[in-house]
Amino acid sequence: MSVTHDEVLKIARLAELDVNAEALPLLAEQMSRILDYVAQINSVPASEGVKPFVPGPDAVRFRADEVKPWPLAFGPAKLAPAFRDGFFVVPKLGQFEEAES
Amino acid sequence: MSDPSEALASAKAAADRLVKAKRLNACLTAPKDLRKSLLAQAQGAHPSGVLYGMPVAVKDNICTLEFTTTCGSRILEGYRSPYEATAVAKLRAAGALIAGKSNCDEFAMGSSTEHSVYGRTLHPFGKARVPGGSSGGSAALVAAGAVPAALGSETGGSVRQPASFCGVVGIKPTYGRVSRYGLVAFGSSLDQIGVLGRSVHDAARVLSVISGRDPKDSTCEDRDPLRLPTVPESLQGFVIGIPKEYFPPDLDPAVRRACDRVIRLFREQGAAVREVSLPHTAYAVATYYIIAPAEASSNLARYDGARYGPRFDGAVDVRALYRATRGRGFGAEVRRRILVGTYVLSSGYYDAYYRKAQQMRALIAQDFRTAFDRGVDLLFTPTTPTAAFKAGEKLADPVAMYLSDIFTVTANLAGLPALSLPIGRIKGLPIGGQFIGQAFLEDELIEAAYAVERVVPATTEA
């Protein structure tokens, strides 16, 4: 199968990832090769009755629902690029601003 | 070792050895910081711990308090975790010294340790070769003698493949044997912390310390830590299965010769050897390269420039900030896998790729159950189809790179324990043999590996 440049850009938008124009042809070609390769699993006869397998415990064990201090060596302010009054600071969401004005 | 002066001497010697191994670009921690930290750790280590004074390097995708945790990525440049991984906390509680962070492929995505923002790690036996990956830094440090053991992580063979390339022992435990708390998530249904060691015993005793229950990880089984087996006199009583799909006609003849030599040793040691079939093996790499990128695309959504690491500023709104930060912060291989993962999960493709891959995974796991139900205790295979390849050789062809995991991904898909140990050399480069065992029977893997390690001519040409 061949992935088009437009499809790569669409997927990149879904993944919130900038893809620059020069990288696009190689990326589309490599994605096509990878998807071609992995599509070989469709040559295995349908296995509709097979239940998906996930390793690990049969049931998720929950911790007791109690509030207790989290033993971090330092707070989130130190690891965030910008932090103010207990919140992560990010640029405004442009679309909402326009809708409100 | 139980004397503080011995621990201090061990810390100093480890710091010296790590500086000597600097040419490999395997350790990401600055020598000055490393020496200072090792000496401080030696002074505060628990003398009663079973690993007292033992330096253990830690892959850069496992959180530590002492050093930065960057996953070899620009997007986490300078990141210091506010908590440490349970595996690291257990090592420290056992008196081990955390001997810096080891280089790896970005977010553990790669098979050559060429995809790190800090540059590639060199193979300790030949700088033109790769050490394997993604735990290539850990493998190179152990192979170079800088540390006796190191932590790595496995999603599709990232401990065993570099162990094979570098001529050391690598153990990937059963999914749920070791807590994943503090291991930066890549493919959550596949990820496990593993151990690389210069011998089976070194790797096994570190695994024993880091294994066991952890209330902070709900996927970690409620079990006691692994108990180490004794070194057996022979392999009497073992039934070892040889899966024919791992010995295709085009397998490198030297790899085949080395494996045949080990199989002869099994018989000489008293084991029964049987050919078995794992018929869905041919689809394992394809299955893996759907499931792992799908899980990665979700796990890596958290790196957005708001909560971790550097932010690439100048964006007009928050979505532009996300895209700019992620587009410039992730390297080419990670970007490619996020895109493939998003693609296979997207509407219209989900059934053909992701759902089908989940079904294939069940069939692959069933193959193993069938083999074990027929009385086989362990399976033996080559770890990799070739010895270490040349740097740059597979960079332009992602599928060729993925195929170097062909013999390792199945154990991850089935959640089974596996161990690679050196079984010979090809033109001076090490190759590994792999045992795959039944879930939570790592002790059997280790027992068999002890017996083989004692007799296999690991440094002899195959």
Image (spheres, helix red, strand yellow):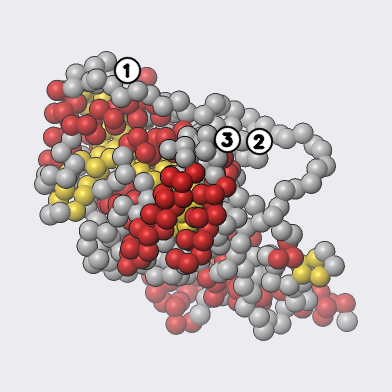
Residue at image position (57%, 57%) is B66
User: CB of mark 1 within 8 Å of CB of mark 2?
Assistant: no
* Camera-nearest residue between B60 and B368: B60
Viewer-proximal residue, B120 or B350? B120
The residue that disc 1 covers is B375
Q: What amino acid is at disc 3?
A: Cys
Measure the C-alpha gap from mark 1 to mark 3: 28 Å
Residue located beneath label 3 in the image? B220
Image vertical order of residue A49 relative to residue B74, above or below: above
Seen in the image, is A99 located left or right of residue B133?
A: right
Along the horizontal axis of the image, is B411 left or right of B394? right
How busy is the neighbourhood of tag 2: few (under 14 within 10 Å), some, or many (20 plus)?
A: some
Amino acid bearing label 2:
Pro
**Which of disc 3 and disc 1 is earlier in sequence?**
3
Chain for numbered disc 1: B
Compared with residue B408, is residue B130 higher up or lower down, i.e. above or below? below
Q: Are marks 1 and 3 in contact (CB under 8 Å)?
A: no
Residue A52 drawn at (x, y percent): 52, 36
C-alpha span from label 1 to label 2:
35 Å
- Residue indicated by mark 2: B215
| Badge 1 and badge 3 in a common chain | yes
Badge 1 or badge 2: first in the primary sequence: 2
* Chain letter of the residue beneath label 3 in the structure image: B
How far across and how far down the image is residue B325, in percent? 60, 73
- For marks 1 and 2, give the one nearer the viewer: 2
Q: Position of residue B227 (x, y in %)?
A: 45, 25
Please give the name of the residue rendered at 29% of the width and 31% of the height, measured from the top-left corner. B449
Residue kind at label 1, given as amino acid type: Gly
Per the model, the C-alpha gap separating discs 3 and 2 is: 8 Å
